[in-house]
C-alpha cells in the first residue's frame, strides 16, 4: 500500500542534485562579483591611481625636503667659514632669501648682526620674529637688542624689551641690563642682587655684578 506524502514532509534531494545546486550558487556569486567589478572597475582604477600618485608625491616631497635641508646646511657652513666680511654677509643674506622657512635661516640671522653692525637692529628684530628660531635664540636676540638700545640712549625701548620673560639661563643678563637703566640707587641694587642670585652661566658678568654691588655699598 502506497503511503501518501504530507506537504510538510521534507523532500529528499539526491546528492548529485545538491552538488549541482551548490555549484550553481557559486557560479551565481561569481557572476555577481564579475558584474560588480565590470561596473566599478573604472572607479577602482581611479582610486588606485590616486593612492599611487599620493605615495609618489609624498616620496618626492620628502626627497625635496631632504635636498633643501642639505643645501641650506652646506651654504650655512660655507658662510660661517668665510673670512671676508662682505662675502660672508652676502652668503648669509642669500641663505635667508632662498631658505627662509628653515632653521638655518634663523641661524644666519644670528650671525648677521656680527658682520653687518649698521643693520644689527633689523637683523635682531627679524630673528625675534622668526617662527623657525628656537626660544633661546629669540631670548638672546631680545637681550642683545635691549643692550643696543641702552647704548643708543633709548632706555624706554630697552625697558620694554626687558619686561618680557626669558629663560632661566638668561635671567642674569636681563637683571643686569635692568640695573643699567635703573633710575635710582635702590632699584639698581635690587636688580643687581637679582642678577647675582640668578643662574650664572657667565663668570665674567658675575664678577662685574659683584663689583658694582660693592661700589654701591661703599
Image (spheres, rainbow, N blue to C red):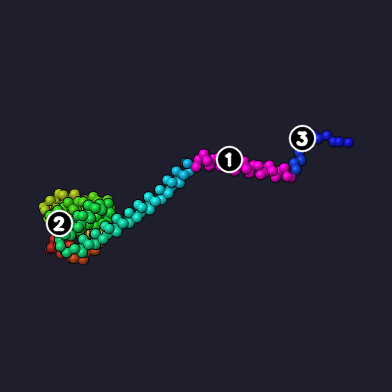
- Which dot, 3 or 2, sits closer to the camera? 3
> Considering only order in the chain, which callout, 2 or 3, is on the residue closer to the N terminus?
3
Where does residue 37 sit, x and y in percent of width and height?
53, 42
Report which residue position mark 2 lands on.
116
Disc 3 is placed on an element classified as loop
Residue at x 11% of width, y 52% of height: 153
Foreground residue, 148 or 189? 148
- When the figure is inspected, residue 9 is found, relative to residue 123, above or below; the finding is above
Tell me the quarter of the image containing the N terminus. Answer: top right
> Considering only order in the chain, which callout, 1 or 2, is on the residue closer to the N terminus?
1
- Which dot, 2 or 1, sits closer to the camera? 1
- Which dot, 1 or 3, sits closer to the camera? 1
Tell me the quarter of the image containing the C terminus. Answer: bottom left
Kindly check if marks 2 and 1 are in contact, taking CB atoms under 8 A apart as contact: no
Which residues, given as a range, are shown in magenta?
15-41
- When the figure is inspected, residue 215 is found, relative to residue 128, above or below; the finding is below
Where does residue 23 sit, x and y in percent of width and height?
66, 44
Q: Is 9 left or right of 57, judged from the image as shown?
A: right
Tell me if I can see residue 62 in this picture: yes
Q: Is 20 left or right of 147, judged from the image as shown?
A: right
Mark 3 and mark 2: Cα distance apart in space:
103 Å
Q: Which mark, by number, is residue 32?
A: 1
Q: Which mark, by number, is residue 81?
A: none
Residue at x 74% of width, y 45% of height: 15
Mark 1 and mark 3: Cα distance apart in space:
33 Å
Question: Quadrant of residue 171 in the image?
Answer: bottom left
- When the figure is inspected, residue 11 is found, relative to residue 94, above or below; the finding is above
> Considering only order in the chain, which callout, 3 or 1, is on the residue closer to the N terminus?
3
Report which residue position mark 3 lands on.
8
Amino acid at each position: 500500500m502506497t503511503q501518501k506524502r504530507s506537504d510538510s514532509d521534507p523532500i529528499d534531494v539526491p546528492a548529485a542534485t545538491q552538488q549541482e545546486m551548490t555549484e550553481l550558487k557559486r557560479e551565481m556569486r561569481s557572476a555577481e562579483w564579475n558584474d560588480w567589478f565590470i561596473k566599478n572597475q573604472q572607479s577602482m582604477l581611479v582610486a588606485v591611481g590616486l593612492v599611487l600618485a599620493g605615495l609618489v608625491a609624498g616620496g618626492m616631497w620628502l626627497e625635496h625636503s631632504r635636498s633643501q635641508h642639505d643645501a641650506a646646511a652646506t651654504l650655512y657652513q660655507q658662510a660661517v667659514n668665510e673670512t671676508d666680511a662682505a662675502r660672508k654677509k652676502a652668503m648669509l643674506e642669500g641663505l635667508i632669501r632662498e631658505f627662509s622657512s628653515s632653521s638655518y635661516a634663523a641661524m644666519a640671522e644670528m650671525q648677521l648682526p656680527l658682520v653687518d653692525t649698521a643693520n644689527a637692529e633689523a637683523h635682531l628684530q627679524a630673528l625675534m620674529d622668526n617662527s623657525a628660531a628656537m626660544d633661546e635664540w629669540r631670548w638672546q636676540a631680545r637681550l642683545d637688542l635691549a643692550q643696543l638700545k641702552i647704548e643708543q640712549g633709548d632706555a624706554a625701548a630697552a625697558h620694554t624689551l626687558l619686561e618680557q620673560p626669558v629663560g632661566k639661563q638668561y635671567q642674569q643678563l636681563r637683571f643686569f641690563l635692568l640695573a643699567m637703566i635703573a633710575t635710582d640707587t635702590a632699584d639698581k641694587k635690587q636688580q643687581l642682587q637679582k642678577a647675582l642670585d640668578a643662574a650664572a652661566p657667565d663668570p665674567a658678568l658675575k664678577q662685574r655684578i659683584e663689583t658694582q654691588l660693592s661700589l654701591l655699598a661703599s
